[in-house]
Every structure is written in structure tokens, then in C-alpha cells.
Amino acid sequence: MSLSATTAPPSPAAPPSPDVSSRRNRGRLLNRLDVKYSPYLYIAPFFLIFGAFGLYPMVRTAWMSLHDWDMIGDHSFIGFDNYTRLFSDEYFWNALVNTFGIFALSTIPQLLLALFLANLLNRTFLRAKTFFRMAIFMPNVVSVAAVAIVFGMLFQREFGLFNWLLGLVGVDPVDWDGQRWSSWFAISSMVNWRWTGYNTLILLAGMQAIPKDLYEAAAIDGASPWRQFWQITLPMLKPTFIFVVILSTIGGMQLFTEPLLFANGNILGGSQREFQTLAMYMYEMGIVNLNSAGYGAAVAWAIFMIIVLVSLFNFLLVRRSAK
Amino acid sequence: MSVTTRRTRLAAASLAAITAIGGLAACGNDDKPAAGEKPAKLVVDTFGEFGYEELVKQYEKDTGIKVELRKTAQLAEYRPKLVRYLATGKGAADVTALEEGILNEFKPNARNWADLNPLVADHSKEYLPWKWELGKAPDGRLIGLPTDVGSLAVCYRKDLFQAAGLPTERDQVSALWPDWKGFHDAGLKYKQGSGGKAFIDSITAVSNGVMFQGNGDLFYDKEDNIIADTSPAVKNAWDTATSMADISAKAQTWSPEWSGGFKQGTFAATFCPSWMLGIVSENSGAANKGKWDVASVPGGGGNWGGSWLAVPAQSKYPKEAAKLAEYLTNAKSQVEAFKAKGPLPTNLEALKNEAFIGYTNEYFSNAPTGKIFGESVAKIQPTHLGPKHQAVKENALEPALRAFESGQADKAKAWEQFTKDAKTQGAF
């Protein structure tokens, strides 16, 4: 309490009067309440909104996942049947493999490229720095639907730009959405195009927070720029890197719009589900099929658990390797 | 007060707040109007183009009830909205257009819809009998009044046919393919004469056409058991479709390859329900006006799409809404709608109407589309569609056909994929 007494501003009810003491007491009480509870009041809006749009849907989804739920009909409690069904569902595992495949194809090259670009942009000799930093972020501002539609056209079988370029060097046209590897490649390229710049900027911010005198000291000791990068930049960048990796993981596990639009809006993701992601499978089961909403909810919770596990794994991995 | 109890209290308070919010949302407005009260306004929900703009104005004038027409461009956007209205019990229009696939899917939960039987006069003899029957739910309630039907024809490019040495007059073209074998032969001839170009857009379009030619039950039997793997009608459609792979452009309907293909001439023929004519002309552009024409479909008849008007049970004015639906689907209205936007009538009187039969389409070389489609309507065979017919067709049959067409799977493997997926997609 002594802390609040010293930090609180003088109360306006301070001037002396007959009932000074009672007023002073009331002022003190208000003060105490203010200090104790106003922080909660300030953060309340977030928690109220989170409760209504974050927590409530999650709890509700968990509840639904324990039912055989028809979107426009009846529902009955079936316990964990939906979850046990997941394990023997071939298409769930197929979606899992696709999601991880596209995730690996997009996140790994993307982060390496972002690291390289951030290192370039961090150089002191670079001219027109602001221009380059702005330019590299531009793809992220473009709407994801626009990106997916344009890339979908580039990757078309008959009139697409990439097949035309391949034709120039004598390669047969590729049916991009007809095979697993080519569709994964096409979708990853959309993700990479959109998110490389974003990650570059975050890594760049992390690099600029590294004290300059470390580099100066290293340079005096005769360390090459390459050595400086490995021995100073990378270790110091560790917290930023963990952040970027976890963010990419969450995005990658929830990949939805790009593959959906690449399949011309078909929720199956290719005629043999070559690129149906987990989020698409959840949508297929929970929203498109009216009578399996409960199972769709179980898929949603499975995605949530997978994201938690993968993020944890990433966190441990990056922490250990950067030690 | 210890920290832990304070925390628990805070958590409890926030939980209470959340439940309060949830509770608020759950409180519906139960202000049912008094019986017989005339509504100030009725809402109509449609997708695509139903051609109701002028009809609705006339209705407003006649009855003094305001009508709000809510249009959604694509069926793919329309369906989720409708599902939301039904799942939450609010927001649905008083009169709602239901496409064939959606209607079948909604039938098992028929209590979401008002029974029109007691609300409108008996019209059962005025429409195509099979179309009328499809509007009924298994429990006997009448969910929908028939609007249009997607009777099939073949749209073909006269200029490309001529260049490949095929006849171009629509009667001669129709004579080329009395059956599907003839269609395939014409396709091979075109391929030869054009230097190896594809004849039709895709083999899924073929399976679509064959399925409705009256070879019996498709994915479900009359008791709604899934019979996709043993149904002769499905096998027939499968075999006919797969036999066309060598003359197909492998352009999936609605894909960019497909819509781009109309301008590029990557295929010379496609299957056209009458509502497709507008899409063909749109995709082909003004430069190709007069190059397209319309011939009859091999094997006679066929059906793709078509809709009904229904009244959701949540409507506050089911009686007035049913009357509006009745008005919009009567013979006169169906002819007006056809003239406005092209949906093909299902009312028998409308199908005999002079204005309908005499109608010609300028873009398609002045083809008498009213006469062509009117005749093909009569050939449509009534087919029983199960609850998840659309899902089995779109998510089991067509992907398997595409996998075969693109060479990802051989015929046996593709058939295996189809029968397996049909069981999961068709379960309900």
C-alpha cells in the first residue's frame, strides 16, 4: 500500500475542510481501487473480444467435436469417436502429409532467402535503403486472393506463362495441378512470394538491434564478414528467429486460401487430393458436408494440437542449435 | 485476498461475461405476427439469374406487399449463406430458391421448410410430373414449387466444324450423333480433320449428359441406399465418358483452361443446358458471335441443374410467401422469366406458349432455342436422386474421371477411387 500512496497524484479533494479525514479516506480508497483494478480495466477490452471471438468458438468447437453433428439437423453425443475416427482416416493423413510437404517447401527456402536478404539490407554501403526495404514488403500488402489468382494463371496448363517459358527451352508442358510435386511447388511459390519480404523485415529489425561495437571489435580482431555473420549475427538473432519460425509454422499449418484458389475453388484440392491441406479438409468436413460438422470440429482441434506440438518442437530445436 | 483466489474470481467473472454475450446472441426475437396479418415486405433469395425483376414489380403493384429481391451471383456463395440461415434459425428470405443438389441435400431435414401443400392450390398436374415429384420430401411434405430445368443440348462451333470437314447445319449435325457412339465417331473425324485438335471440353461433361438418360437409379436406390458401385446407369455413364478421353481437351468445367478455351477454340463442342448459353456467349466474346450453334444431344434428352422455390419454416409469413412463390412459378411468369434471362420453363402450359416456342437466340446463329430446348425437355427421364447425389457426383465421380482423363490413374484404379469415395461422400 505504501507504494500506491507515494505514486498516486495528489487528490483534488485535498483542501482542508471540516470533514477532512473522511474525505481523505474516501480519496484514499478510490486511489487504492484505481491502482489495484484499473490495469484490469485497461486490458479488459482485449479479453472481452478474445473471449467472444477466440475462446468461445474454441470451447464450442471442442463441444461440437464430441458430437455427431448435423449442421441443419440433429446432434447426439458420441464421446471421442470423432477423434478415434481421425486415426484411421486416410484422407486426414493425406492432408497432413500435404500440409507438411508444402510447409517444408515454403518455409525453409523462404527463411533462408529472408536471412540472406536481411543481411544484404543491413549492409551500411547500400544506397536507397528505404526504397529497397519498402519494395521487399510490397508483396505482403497485396491481397492473398489476388496473388493466388495471378499465380494460378501463371501456372495454367494451356496458356500459362511458366509452361510457355518451359516450352522455349524444349521442356514439355507440366500439368501443374495434376501431380503432387508440381502442385506443391506452385503453392509454395505463392507463399514464398508473399511472405519472404515480411520475414526479411522482421529479421532485419532483429539484426539492427545487435550492438555495432561487437562487429567493430570482431573486425579489429580480423574476423571476416562471413565469420562475423556466423559468430555474431546468427546467435544474436536467435529470439527473432524463434519468433519468425513459430509464426511461419502457424501460417503454414493453416494454409487454406492459396491451395483452394489454385484448385479453382474445389475443396478436394486436385482430383486425387494431391494438395488438399488440413485446413481444407477441416472445411470440407465441417462446412461443405452438412452432416459431418462434429467431425470437422475434431479436425479443427487436431490442427490446433499439431500447431502446438510443431511450435514446441521448433522452439526446442532453434534454442538448442543456436546455443 | 490471496493472488490465486483473486485470479480465480477474475477468471470466473470473465467467463460469466462471455456466457452473457453468448446468451444475448442466443436470445431470438419471438415476435410472431398475429394470424392473418398482412406483411409489409417479403424477401426473395435467388442465385444466378432467375429473371424475376419485372415480375416482382408487378406483384408489388397487384398486392401492395413490398418485395425485396436478394440476388447472389454464384451458387457456391449462395449455399453457405443458406446453411448459416438454417443452422442459426434466422436471416432466411421468405421465398428461397433451391437448386437441385441443395434441395436433395436438405430433404432429410425437411422440417426446416414449410409444407406448401395446405398453403397453395393443387398444381401437381400443371408441371412436368418428375419435376413436381422431386419437390417433395420423403415425409410427404411439399418443399418446393418447380422453377426451371437444365435440359441439355450441344453447343458447337460452326467455323471449326467446317474447317475440319464436318457438316455445319444444325439438323445435319444432330443427325451425326443419334447415339454416343456417333458422337465419338464425329469427334474422331473432327480430330483427324483439324490436325489433332480436341472435340469436347471434358469427359465429366459427357458423364453428366449420359447419367440422366433414363437408365435407372444412379448413386442411390429408391430406399436411398448407396449403390454407386453396382448401379448399371452409373457404370454406363462411366464407360461412355471414359471412352471419350481421346477426343477431350481435358479442361475442367469452370476452370481457367475451360473458360479460356471458348475463345481459343481448344474444343469445338460442349454440352449446354439452356442456362449455359449465356455463359458460352460470355466466355467466347463478341468476336465469336454467330460462330456458335445449337444441336440436339446424343441419346436424346438429359438434364443438368434446375431449381425450385421454397419457403423456410422460419419465415414469419409462410402463407403470403407461398402465394408469392406460386405466382413466380405460374405459366405466365415462367415465360416472362425465360424471355428475360433464359431459365427453361417446367410449367406444361408455358412450354406450349407461342412466345416461348418461337424464341430465337441471336448469338447462336439465330438458333430456335425455345423449340430445341422445349423438345428436349419432353425427353428428360425422371431419375431418383439421393440425399447426397451432388456430393457423390462432384467429389467422387468427377475427380475419379479427371484422374483417369489426365493419366494419373488407369481405368481400374480410377473406378476403385470412385467407388471408395462414393461410399464416404454418400453417407448421411
Image (cartoon, helix red, strand yellow):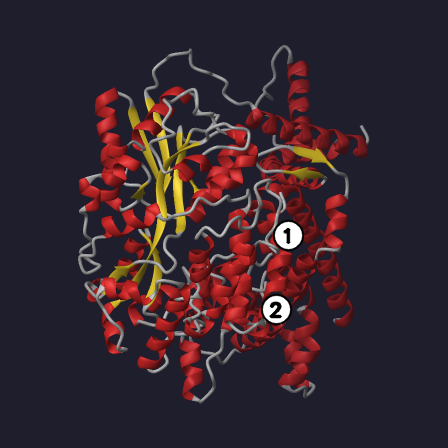
In the image shown, does B263 or B323 lie closer to the viewer?
B323
User: How many neighbours does mark 1 have within 10 angstroms: few (below 14), some (14-19), or many (20 or more)?
Assistant: some
- B269 displayed left or right of A75: left
Residue A308 sits in quarter: bottom right
**Circle 1 sits on which residue?**
B423
In the image shown, does B76 or B111 lie closer to the viewer?
B111
Find residue B40 and report its horizontal and vertical position in percent. Answer: 32, 20
Name above or below for residue A212 compared with residue B425: below
Residue depicted at x 51% and y 28%: B140
- B126 displayed left or right of A233: left
Find residue B246 and report its horizontal and vertical position in percent. Answer: 45, 75
Find residue A26 and report its horizontal and vertical position in percent. Answer: 66, 18
- The kind of residue tagged 1 is Lys
- B3 displayed left or right of B15: right
The N terminus of chain A appears in which quarter of the rendering? top right
**Circle 2 sits on which residue?**
B412
How far apart marks 1 and 2 lie (CA) works out to 17 Å
Looking at the image, do the residues carrying marks 1 and 2 touch, with CB atoms under 8 Å apart? no
Residue B196 sits in quarter: bottom left
Q: Looking at the image, can residue A142 be seen?
A: no
Q: Secondary structure at mark 2?
A: helix
Residue depicted at x 42% and y 39%: B130
The C terminus of chain A appears in which quarter of the rendering? bottom right
Find residue B274 and report its horizontal and vertical position in percent. Answer: 31, 51
